[in-house]
Image (cartoon, coloured by chain):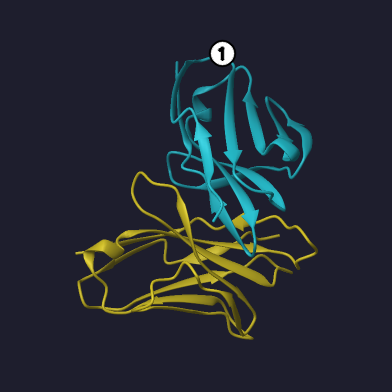
Amino acid sequence: NAGVMQNPRHLVRRRGQEARLRCSPMKGHSHVYWYRQLPEEGLKFMVYLQKENIIDESGMPKERFSAEFPKEGPSILRIQQVVRGDSAAYFCASSPWRGGSYEQYFGPGTRLTVT
Amino acid sequence: GIQVEQSPPDLILQEGANSTLRCNFSDSVNNLQWFHQNPWGQLINLFYIPSGTKQNGRLSATTVATERYSLLYISSSQTTDSGVYFCAVNYGQNFVFGPGTRLSVLP
């Protein structure tokens, strides 16, 4: 039973390029969350998605960042025109259907470096 | 929004020692999880514990939801326990993480 998969594990982009981060949830999980962790800091919630729906994007920067979770395929976090401040570890988590309370399982993260 | 605090922020132990990590939160929550982020950055689920007490080997956790805190106990610590321990609470539709406790276990 594979866990949450994220790729790539490491991504280097020059300023102004686009970064695409992928997340495949655990089998049977229909809820996906994205978090950002800056160096030496805790994780900050960015966005919560279900298949084809964005449920909560209150933690997502208003510009340059977008996320999707299509009917087929992985969830994608897209960062356009990256800047040095976007350098961070981006973690994806998934959970099973929501029945009042639920447990999140995290992927290994994607470490984005903007040069 | 909810505030999540963890103490102590840093902890240095000699191998074999015991420790208690604390997580306080400012509002009622649906659930709480403890994670260990190892030195390679991986987040490992330790406990899903909205209330009560659970044990897993040398680790145990207690959440007193009515008093808005949770404790993580590590007994007979090992060098492989080093890393950052986070608590995270489910508040509304997302999880809010505490700032973490950085644990260093010395041989």
Picture layout, residue B59 above or below residue A28: above
Task: Name the residue at 33% across, 48% down.
Answer: A39
Mark 1: give few (<14), some (14-19) or many (20+) Cα within 10 Å: some
Q: Give the quadrant of residue A113.
A: bottom left
How far across and how far down the image is residue A107, in percent? 54, 58
Per the image, label 1 sits on a secondary structure element best described as loop
- In this view of the protein, which residue sits in the foreground, A65 or A15? A65
Picture layout, residue A13 above or below residue B98: below
Picture layout, residue A18 above or below residue A39: below
A88 lies left or right of B72: left
Q: In which quadrant will I find the N terminus of chain B?
A: bottom right
Q: In which quadrant will I find the C terminus of chain B?
A: top left
How far across and how far down the image is residue A7, in percent? 46, 67
Q: How many marks?
A: 1
Q: Give the quadrant of residue B94.
A: bottom right
B61 lies left or right of A23: right
Picture layout, residue B32 above or below residue B16: below
How far across and how far down the image is residue B83, in percent? 46, 34
Task: Name the residue at 64% across, 65% down.
Answer: B93
Task: Name the residue at 73% across, 58% down.
Answer: A102
Identify by letter the chain in cyan: B
- In this view of the protein, which residue sits in the foreground, A80 or A61? A61
Identify by letter the chain in yellow: A
Name the residue type under label 1. Answer: Gly
Report which residue position mark 1 lands on: B16
Task: Name the residue at 71% across, 50% down.
Answer: B31
- In this view of the protein, which residue sits in the foreground, B27 or A43? B27
